[in-house]
Image (spheres, rainbow, N blue to C red):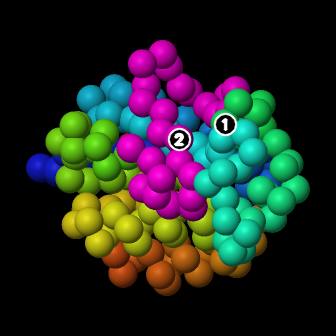
Amino acid sequence: MSEHRPVLLAMDFQEVIVGRGNGGAALANVNRAIAAARAAGVPVMFVRVAFRPGYPEVSANNAVFGRIGAAGDGMTQDSPATQLHADLDVRPGDPVILKRRVSAFSGSDLDVLLRGAGADALILAGLSTSGVVLSTLRQAADLDYALTVLSDACADADEEVHRVLTERVFPRQATVTTADDWIRTLA
């Protein structure tokens, strides 16, 4: 392992999201990465997106969340749909970050938790590649984190978008690898 102090972020592996596209395969891969991270002493943090009842955080101007707020479709923070997936390896005491936007940093306390952990590197896994992974990667790069994306622990409803992001866009700002290849770096 490098001299960095990494944190593994498992983002948006929620009941309502895992069933889309290749979410199940990404869930299995992130669980292997989580187990390896714990064994190597790498902190693991979990991120989920949800809103307060009545959606006061959601502007009608927001193209992504405006429809959700208008529909009132069960994306509140207490809704079963927004909870972390039952098969995700979350343990008591693991930090769970609640965010109100696409990026894991926006509307959350992620920055405070990462500073508290002394992190300077992030390992990213999440659903969806074109949503939380892309937005978080861009913001984390601007905050000077060293970045790794676990390509097979990410998924997107559009497989071609996932491929383009992981093969062409993300490598400009991050190391892109598979969960198993990253796990081998921990040994």
In the image, what residue occupies the spot 79% across and 58% down? 68
Examine the residues drawn in magenta and state their main secondary structure. loop
Query: What amino acid does circle 1 point to?
Result: Gln
Q: Eyeballing the image, is 135 above or below 71?
A: below
Q: Position of residue 143 (x, y in %)?
A: 26, 65
Could you say which is closer to the camera, residue 183 or residue 125?
125
Residue range corresponding to the magenta coloring: 83-109
Characterize the local packing of mark 2: few (<14), some (14-19) or many (20 or more) Cα atoms within 10 angstroms.
many
Disc ID at residue 77: 1
Q: Is residue 173 left or right of residue 4?
A: right
Tag count in the figure? 2
Which element is circle 2 on?
Answer: strand
Query: What amino acid does circle 2 point to?
Result: Leu
Distance from Cα at disc 2 to Cα at disc 1: 8 Å
Which image quarter: residue 88?
top right
In the image, what residue occupies the spot 45% across and 62% down? 136
In the image, what residue occupies the spot 55% across and 76% down? 165
Residue 87 is a magenta residue: yes
Q: Earlier in the sequence, mark 2 or mark 1?
A: 1
Which element is circle 1 on?
Answer: loop
Which of the image's four quarters has the C terminus?
Answer: top left
Residue 127 appearing in the image: no
Q: Is residue 117 left or right of residue 176?
A: left
Q: What residue did someone put label 2 on?
A: 98
Could you say which is closer to the camera, residue 72 or residue 1?
72
Residue 82 is a magenta residue: no
Q: Are marks 2 and 1 in contact (CB under 8 Å)?
A: yes
Which image quarter: residue 87?
top right
